Structure formats: C-alpha cells, structure tokens
C-alpha cells in the first residue's frame, strides 16, 4: 500500500482568534518563494509592504514577524501572489503547527509573532 503525506489544512494552526475578521488580513506575497505551507511565519518588507518568509537575519523589515499564512500557497512564479490570507493579530496559534524556512529559527519566529499579538501555545 502506498503511503501518503498529509499537508497542513488551511488555518489548522489556529487555536483562537478575535471576533469577525479582526485577526485576518489579505496581503500581497512576493513571488519566487516556492510552495509555502499553511502556518508559515511571514515578515513584511518595509519598502514595498509586501510579505515574504520571515527571516531573523534579514535587514529589510522581514526580520520582524508580521503574520502567519492561513493556507498553502504556490508562490513559485516570479510575479507577486496577490491577496493571500494571513492571521496578523489578536490570535493564539499551535506552535507545533507553524513553520519557518529553517526549522532552527522556529522558536525565534514564535517569539517575534508575540510582537504583533499572535501568541504561540
């Protein structure tokens, strides 16, 4: 019997969020990032206000966590991916369901999310 790999379901990392859509935003994600899973920690590039992978050593603004991608997104094309959903504030998330580009940076990414009111549990 062939094995299967289950990808993260949209927003399965979410423990709780604010009423309505207060915790959510639709943002522009830059292209050429590959396929990003639901639960990827994102940073916001200051100069363009576009989102990319959160990286602790960056110097373009994306070193500060700005949200968590709600659904798997194909960002392999060179152009921008418009209107992806993120959790950007006032939420609790399951830390074990989040991801960063390098797994070694996950703890720092979760700490950085607290700066925008997203608390890892």
Image (cartoon, rainbow, N blue to C red):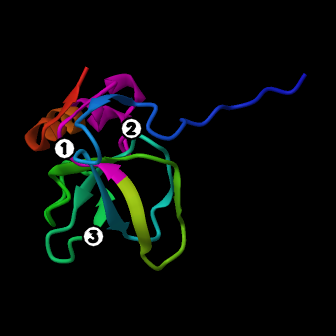
Instruction: Tell me the residue that label 3 is attached to.
Output: 50
Which of discs 3 and 1 lies nearer the camera? The answer is 1
Assess whether residue 101 is covered by the magenta stretch.
yes
Residue drawn where x is 14% and y is 62% of the image: 61
Do the CB atoms of the residues marked 2 and 3 lie less than 8 Å apart? no
Which image quarter is the C terminus in? top left
Question: Which numbered dot is residue 100?
Answer: none
Instruction: Tell me the residue that label 2 is attached to.
Output: 99
Which stretch did the figure color magenta? 86-107
Instruction: Tell me the residue that label 1 is attached to.
Output: 89
Which of discs 2 and 1 lies nearer the camera? The answer is 1
Residue drawn where x is 15% and y is 33% of the image: 111
Q: Give the distance between the C-alpha atoms of the residues marked 2 and 1, in whole angstroms.
A: 17 Å
Q: How many numbered marks have been drawn onto this rendered protein structure? A: 3
Residue drawn where x is 27% and y is 70% of the image: 50
Where residue 86 sits in the image (x, y, percent)?
Answer: 34, 51
Assess whether residue 28 is covered by the magenta stretch.
no
Query: Mark 2 or mark 3: which comes first in sequence?
Result: 3
Do the CB atoms of the residues marked 2 and 1 lie less than 8 Å apart? no
Q: Secondary structure at mark 2?
A: loop
Residue density around tag 2, few if under 14, some if 14–19, many if 20 or more, within 10 Å: many
Residue density around tag 1, few if under 14, some if 14–19, many if 20 or more, within 10 Å: many
Do the CB atoms of the residues marked 3 and 1 lie less than 8 Å apart? no
Where residue 74 sits in the image (x, y, percent)?
Answer: 55, 60
Question: Measured along the vertical axis of the image, is residue 25 above or below residue 6?
Answer: below
């Amino acid at each position: 019997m062939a094995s299967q790999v289950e990808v993260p379901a949209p927003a399965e990392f979410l423990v709780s969020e604010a009423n309505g859509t207060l915790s959510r935003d639709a943002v522009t994600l830059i292209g050429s990032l590959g396929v990003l899973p639901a639960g990827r920690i994102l940073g916001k590039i200051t100069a363009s206000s576009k989102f990319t992978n959160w990286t602790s050593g960056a110097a373009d603004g994306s070193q500060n966590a700005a949200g968590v991608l709600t659904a798997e997104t194909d960002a392999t094309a060179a152009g921008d991916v418009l209107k992806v959903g993120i959790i950007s504030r006032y939420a609790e998330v399951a830390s074990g369901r989040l991801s960063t580009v390098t797994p070694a940076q996950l703890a720092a990414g979760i700490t950085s999310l607290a700066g925008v009111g997203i608390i890892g549990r």
